[in-house]
Image (cartoon, rainbow, N blue to C red):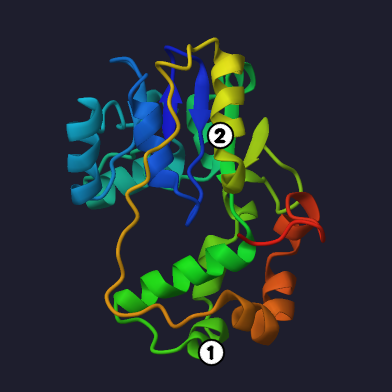
Amino acid sequence: MIVSHRHKFIFVKTKKTAGTSIEIALSKICGPKDILSPLRNDDEQFRRNQTGKEAQNHDIPFSKYTAKDWLRMVRYLKRRRYYNHMPALEIKQYVGASIWDSYFTFCFERHPIDKVKSHYLWQKRKGGFQDIASYMASKKIEEIKGDHFYTDDGTTVLVDKVYRMEDMDMAFSDIGNRLSIPSELLKKPSYFRKKYKGKDLLDKEKLQLEFGETIRNIFQFEYSNWYGENFAAK
């Protein structure tokens, strides 16, 4: 996640939506006082090489601590920090309503079929699941539901704008216009997709045929708000 005081925006990072690539692209325009949450070691190195920026200012000030935060501090001797994939509700709590309401807040979504496929292959690569059926039967799929990241109760959207990953060109053009950032400074991500070993045997049409109804039931919020019947997975 990013809180940019220089350009007055907050980027909420959802899962399996090219979030790291987007975060690295946005890091290029951030200033020394902006908040950049830490990435994985390899992604952090990539950001450093690409932008000259790295995680910074991610310790949450003691003045923002809740009673629960202080108890955690005493028990584990660990600072509360802004972190990767931090939900909008939690970010708002720590930056404060005045900053949240006055900054442009946004995130990205992705078609549920594509998001499920990407998450399954990532889990499989880690040795989590051997087939799509076992993945679908697990609760892991719940981890990538978008409304967990950008709503307060599963119904009310907290961010100003939810862009679709499929509309990346339009999204970055709109972000630049809203923030008055020239296009030569704010460029859309240059993707660095992680390669999966072995042949990808998961066909999206088969995924839709066998598990489409289940996916639609799980991702009702995404389908209802961002992906209508006329929008096909790409």
Q: Which mark is in front, 1 or 2?
A: 2
Residue drawn at (28%, 41%), measured in percent from left and top? 38
Establish if 182 lies above or below 217: above
The kind of secondary structure element at disc 2 is helix
- Determine which residue is flagged by label 1: 133
Density class for disc 1 (Cα within 10 Å; few <14, some 14-19, many ≥20) is: few
The residue nearer to you, when weighing 90 against 28, is: 28
Please state, as top left, top right, bottom left or bottom right, where the N terminus lies in the image.
Answer: top left
Q: Is residue 188 left or right of residue 110?
A: left
Establish if 199 lies above or below 142: below
Q: Earlier in the sequence, mark 1 or mark 2?
A: 1
Residue drawn at (66%, 33%), measured in percent from left and top? 161
Q: Is residue 26 left or right of residue 175?
A: left
User: Where residue 178 appears, x then y in whole percent?
Assistant: 61, 16
Residue drawn at (57%, 43%), measured in percent from left and top? 108
Q: Quadrant of residue 26?
A: top left
The residue nearer to you, when weighing 46 against 81, is: 46
* Mark 1–mark 2 distance (CA, rounded to whole Å): 34 Å
Please state, as top left, top right, bottom left or bottom right, where the C terminus lies in the image.
Answer: bottom right
- Determine which residue is flagged by label 2: 169
Q: Amino acid under label 1?
A: Ala
> Can see residue 3?
yes
Establish if 4 lies above or below 129: above
Label 1 with label 2: CB-CB less than 8 Å = no
Q: Amino acid under label 2?
A: Asp
Q: Quadrant of residue 73?
A: top left
The residue nearer to you, when weighing 116 against 82, is: 116
